[in-house]
Amino acid sequence: MFNKIMTPVDLAHEGDLAKALQCTADLAKHYDAEVHFVGVTTGTPSATAHNPQEYKGKLAEFAKAQADKHGIRATADPVIAHDPTTDVDDALLRAIDDTGADLVVMQSHMPNILDYIWPSNGGKIAEHAKCSVLVVRG
Amino acid sequence: MADETDIEGIPTPEGAADIIETDYRIGQDNIQTKVGPFGIDIHNPVFVISGLLVIAFVIFALAAPGTANAIFNGVDAAEVEGCEAGAFCDLGMRAYLTSNFDWFFLWGANIFVIFCLLLIVSPWGSVRLGGTDATPDYGYAGWFAMLFAAGMGIGLMFFGVLEPAYYFGTPWGDEPLGTVRPFGEDGALIEGNVEEARRMALAATSFHWALHPWAIYAVVALALALFSYNKGLPLSIRSAFYPLLGERVWGWWGHIIDTVAVFATLFGLATSLGFGAQQANAGMSYVYGLPNNVTVQVILIVAITAVALVSVLRGLDGGVKVLSEINMVVALLLLLFVLFTAGAVGILTDFFSTLGAYVQEIVPLSNPHGREDTGYMQGWTAFYWAWWISWSPFVGMFIARVSRGRTVREFITCVLIVPSIVCIFWMAVFGGSAINDIIANPETSAVKANVIDSYSPELSLFAMLESLPLAAITSTIGVILVIVFFVTSSDSGSLVIDTITAGGKVDAPVSQRFFWCTFEGLVAIALLVGGGLGALQAMVISTGLPFTIILLVLCYGILRGLMSEKQRALS
């Protein structure tokens, strides 16, 4: 049913992603789908990497580790955003088109009052993406 | 693929770049938590100290407005015993600095100009910000619009008519280089002096808006961009000090540097927001007869802050860039309108003669020694230099944020040469047509009435527009431009403060920019209602002195940084 699964990851908060990663691996195995781990980074140095190239390397390592651990096929797709605080959603929506994913699996926080004003990333992707989106609560 | 990165994650630059190895990890000092539904990711202690310091100074200015004003802005010379009116006796910190350190400000700015011009022609000009293989984040149009709207903006609206008209006809002895006056004792025009006075007025105005201010911005911006994009240090003012202070920049030295930068930026923005609201209000009451009072001004600040909020919440690409571009288009339309209605051919000739006069006079105007025109040199030039320098952390950091992927040569050309030419053109158009109006109608000119006969600087632009056709429409555009220019400074300023107080992180939660943008509006309102705008603005300008020393150090840091980039590229 699904050929390409896209899973957005935040390398700075890798520990919080356990559920979404497990879910991605299970679905990938079940449908024999290829996984694209998409990470959004900045041109400026961040907590994760000094520059986009270094980030790319770290994301590739992460994808490889996931592939080895779960026995799935996985690639890394870094995306550069100018202002990630506000651009993450748009960057991810573009990545869905670029990767040609037919399923997005993403972690999201428990909804709170603030989501009425600023929707969560997961919520916004689910609302605007043309493919199926599975939002996994953390 | 990027598998070149080894297992420890040792940084692989984008092409050749010379990363600085440091144990500091961006965000290591940050407090990350949640308050209710709001996520927080702030630098400890820069965020808290700068916030509290700002509040403390606002309280000081509100509680003791007289003392605050006397310290920073000075008291009226007439109130000082044994002091002749108009003399510099006890005019507070600002006048003390501009009259005693004028030579230092002037030489500092000269060095920055020479430094930047040398970089363009030097082999280091080919170093690319972000590594040899980096590509520019923004196209030329968007990039230029953003750096211009943040860097000058409102000043062009306020001083474009005021300054040339003032130098042309000043009755207060501020003639640049002691040039001739076009008016005799009886107020009649002296035909023989008009041409020279006009030439000098335009050259002296251009002097304050062209190479020198942009060189100041370029030095700060280049230092930050180089140390962040090529050396891998966080995008924060402290990073530029790494060559001098080494690992100490991550400790209290760095905290102090960043806090002072936040402080200067926030107060610089808040006080100009307060004054800007007064100017916009004065303009509106002049044009539409609206009441000119604190209520209208507070409403204006709230409106400006609200638009700035929308802009920062939409982000760099969706908000700040879009608004800057709109701003540029509207400003260009106004410029073209004035150009054509005031006589395009004459003004174009003006542009070239202003450019010529600027080139001719730049050396005598930048020399601080043996000058007798202290009114101009200290009251205007030294004041301007201190002002530009106090704004440089903010503008420099914003320029750095949007300049990744450019070579040093491209960067300096676009941050120094192009804006200088645009500013000279603007001054020639607005100043030239204002002076023409004064010459043509010395009896009835509204510009003359508001700048020379009595001093109402905030009305100068509207007075000039009045002399041209369709004044009702263009004045409305003028008011809108004043407001939009404020928004573009306010939103980029909030982004800069947010990044510094998040320890160089550009992905801090959106609630933090909301906080700084609102805080800036509140500080402006508090100072507007309670008094103290002038005192705190004078205080901000006083930070120009320590920052001049800092900028000189930055030049050294840039050279060291570029040398190591070049060596790495060669090896």
Image (cartoon, rainbow, N blue to C red):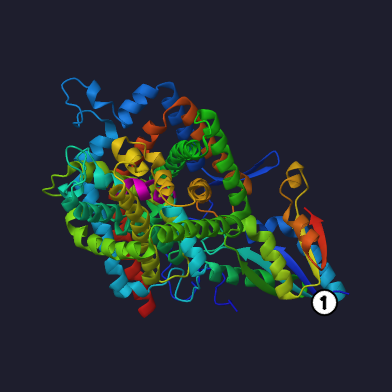
Q: Which residue is mark 1?
A: A3
Q: Is residue B296 magenta?
A: no
Q: Is residue A8 left or right of residue B175?
A: right
Secondary structure found at label 1: loop
Foreground of the two, B534 or B13: B534
* Stretch of the chain drawn in magenta: B154-164
Q: Amino acid at mark 1?
A: Asn
Residue B23 showing in the rendered view: no
Q: Quadrant of residue B462?
A: top left
x and y percent of residue B169 in the render? Answer: 25, 44
Residue pictured at 40% horizontal, 22% vertical:
B64
Residue pictured at 40% horizontal, 44% vertical:
B463
Total residue callouts:
1
Q: Residue furthest left?
A: B370
Residue pictured at 45% horizontal, 72% vertical:
B131
What is the crowding at mark 1: few (fewer than 14 residues within 10 Å), some, or many (at least 20)? some
x and y percent of residue B95 in the render? Answer: 25, 36
Identify the image quadrant of the N terminus of chain B.
bottom right
Foreground of the two, B535 or B292: B292
